[in-house]
Image (cartoon, helix red, strand yellow):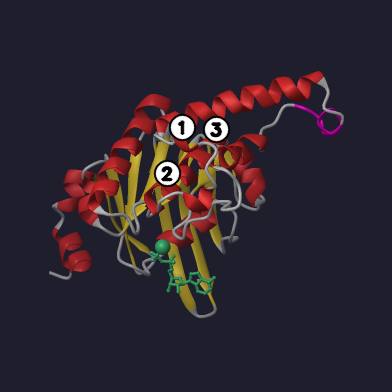
Amino acid sequence: MALLEVDNLGISFGGLCAVNEFHLQIEKGCLYGLIGPNGAGKTTVFNLLTGVYKPDSGIIKLDGENMVGKKTIDINKSGIARTFQNIRIFKELTVLDNVKVGLHNHHKYTTLEGIFRLPKYFKVEKEMDAKAMELLRVFGLEDEAETLASNLPYGKQRKLEIARALATEPKLLLLDEPAAGMNPNETKELMDTIRFVRDEFDMTILLIEHDMKLVSGICEKLTVLNFGEVLTEGKTSDVLNDPEVIKAYLGE
Ligand SMILES: Nc1ncnc2c1ncn2[C@@H]1O[C@H](COP(=O)(O)OP(=O)(O)O)[C@@H](O)[C@H]1O
Ligand SMILES: [Mg+2]
């Protein structure tokens, strides 16, 4: 059984059919790319997977569990975490506290223990600090743990957003154009980090990208979306050599 199973997924906005009969199967541990030109419906797929939009039709299953109709927060608790095309971090919090926000989604002490600062609260807080620092180290952000997130350079803010998503201990990590706005050096470093996260955490990752070159280097499988529909899917090398893809996607 695939970790993520999506079939016949669709949504329209007014008269516009943004996603139509979309399907996707992702095996555990796969680094999977969802590509397509701007406006193809990629972000809408993420919004459907995370419960931001309710689909008009279709099924979404994570580890066999139905996700359709669940609230965003419950979908996150079931194991889907995401980043956004337009970066979303808590700019007024420190880098460390941003990651701890993700960890708090899974906190192990009761509200009363928190309010009265009972021993369990301190123990859990300490564990969270250690876990958050571990994640910051993966992303090379440990020296900036106490820096305000707004003071980080853009490339590092993007990394922080991924670290925070990982803090919720997802089964599936969705990254929406994580390299958007990065320079070539930052992009290369980020791609190395994404590969490392997959290998080290045995993470399953679905990566949205409009730049084909970028995903071809790291994704094992691709789905190409065009005008809201799956144009083709399969092993990256097969997809990139598909004349249909070259014609429709590259306009060649
Ligand atoms: N909330 C919405 N209301 C109306 N139209 C939307 C909404 N969200 C997305 N769309 C439309 O759906 C299409 C796909 O958008 P999107 O998923 O953002 O594309 P991509 O991420 O591939 O660039 C676009 O035409 C966009 O304008
Ligand atoms: Mg998008």
Residue 2 shown left or right of residue 126 in the figure: left
Upstream in sequence: badge 2 or badge 3? 2
Q: Amino acid at mark 3?
A: Glu
Residue 149 shown left or right of residue 242 in the figure: right
Rounded to the nearest angstrom, the CA distance separating label 2 from label 3 is: 16 Å
Closer to the camera: disc 2 or disc 3? 2
Residue 141 lies, in percent from the top left, at 44, 36
Pointer 2 residue: 159
Pointer 3 residue: 169
What is the crowding at mark 2: few (fewer than 14 residues within 10 Å), some, or many (at least 20)?
A: many
Looking at the picture, does residue 128 appear above or below residue 82? above
Q: How many marks?
A: 3
Q: Quadrant of the N terminus?
A: top left
Residue 56 lies, in percent from the top left, at 57, 64
Residue placed most toward the observer, 83 or 151: 151
Q: Amino acid at mark 2?
A: Lys
Q: Secondary structure beneath disc 2? A: helix
Q: Which residues are magenta?
A: 109-115
Upstream in sequence: badge 2 or badge 1? 1
Residue 208 lies, in percent from the top left, at 37, 53
Rounded to the nearest angstrom, the CA distance separating label 1 from label 3 is: 19 Å
Query: In the image, what residue occupies the spot 42% across and 49% down?
Result: 158
